[in-house]
Structures are given as structure tokens and as C-alpha cells.
Amino acid sequence: MNLHFSSSYTSENLSTELGITNQIALASGQPKIERVYFIGDNPDVAIIGANMYNHLLPQEINLRTSISCYNLLTDSKYLSATSCESILVCTGVYEPNKQKLDCKNPWKLPTTIKLDVFEAVKYIILKESWPWIVNC
């Protein structure tokens, strides 16, 4: 299972949300969240935020095993995300015909670029092997 958030969530809020969502998933026999997707139209905000969160995940995993009370959760098994992908959409700040991505700054490089949020969600669905949802 994977979770999709906008860039307005901080690392702390996202970790708390992941924990709560995973508690519910495990209680209902669903898989835990393994990958998080950030969708945004601003390389300076959403994409940098997603890439920073992805960079911090390995450190966060180490913290989960060394601190007994991580954030608000006492059981680290609920904090399961291992990767974060950034999806840049061309519906707001970023316009590919008017500006180029800063390829010298890896923090601003998205995992992928999609035309709009609908295409971004389709990308996620297909990547997660749920093609039957797209074909409905």
C-alpha cells in the first residue's frame, strides 16, 4: 500500500499519518505503506520537500529502531515508508515551455514530470500495478 500527500505535510506530520494509517491497515488485514508520493507544481517547494523527505528516510528508519517513543507512536512497526517519489505537474508554477529545471541542483529534480494531477495519479496507479483502476 502507498500513500499520496501534497507538500504541505512536514516530515513529522507525515510520519504520524503513516503510523495511524498503518495501524488501521494492519487491523483490517491490509499491507502497510511502503512508498509515499508527493505531487506538486513547484520544484522549489514540493519537489525539494519530497527529495529531502526521501533523503531523510534512511535516517528515520535508524531512529525508529533506536528510540522507543518515535513521535507519538510507541511501536515502530507502524512506520514503514521506505521511499518517497516526487511528481512535478505542469498546472501551476512550473511551465515546461517557459522554464527549465535546474539540473545542477539534484534537490529540484523530480522523479517524473506529468501534465496534470490526473496524469500523476494514473502514473501512480500503473506503477503500483493497479491497472484495473485506470481501465474503469
Image (tube, rainbow, N blue to C red):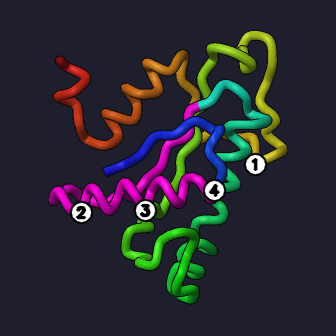
Residue at which label 2 appears: 26
Marks 4 and 2, how far apart at CA: 22 Å
Find residue 128 and report its horizontal and vertical position in percent.
31, 43
Closer to us: mark 1 or mark 2? 2
Q: Which quadrant holds residue 79?
A: bottom left
Given residues 113 and 20, the one toward you in this image is 20
Number of residues whose C-alpha sits closer than 10 Å to that of mark 3, classed few (under 14), some (14–19) or many (20 or more): many
Q: Secondary structure at mark 2?
A: helix
**Residue placed at 80% from the left, 11% from the top?**
98
**Residue placed at 51% from the left, 59% from the top?**
16
User: Does the magenta-highlighted stretch encompass residue 90?
Assistant: no
Q: Quadrant of the C terminus?
A: top left
User: Does the magenta-highlighted stretch encompass residue 18?
Assistant: yes
Marks 4 and 3, how far apart at CA: 12 Å
Residues rendered magenta in the picture: 11-39
Find residue 65 and report its horizontal and vertical position in percent.
51, 85
The disc placed on residue 106 is: 1
Marks 1 and 2, how far apart at CA: 35 Å
**Residue placed at 62% from the left, 30% from the top?**
40
Residue at which label 3 appears: 19
Closer to us: mark 3 or mark 1? 3
* Amino acid type shown at disc 4: Ser
Number of residues whose C-alpha sits closer than 10 Å to that of mark 2, classed few (under 14), some (14–19) or many (20 or more): few
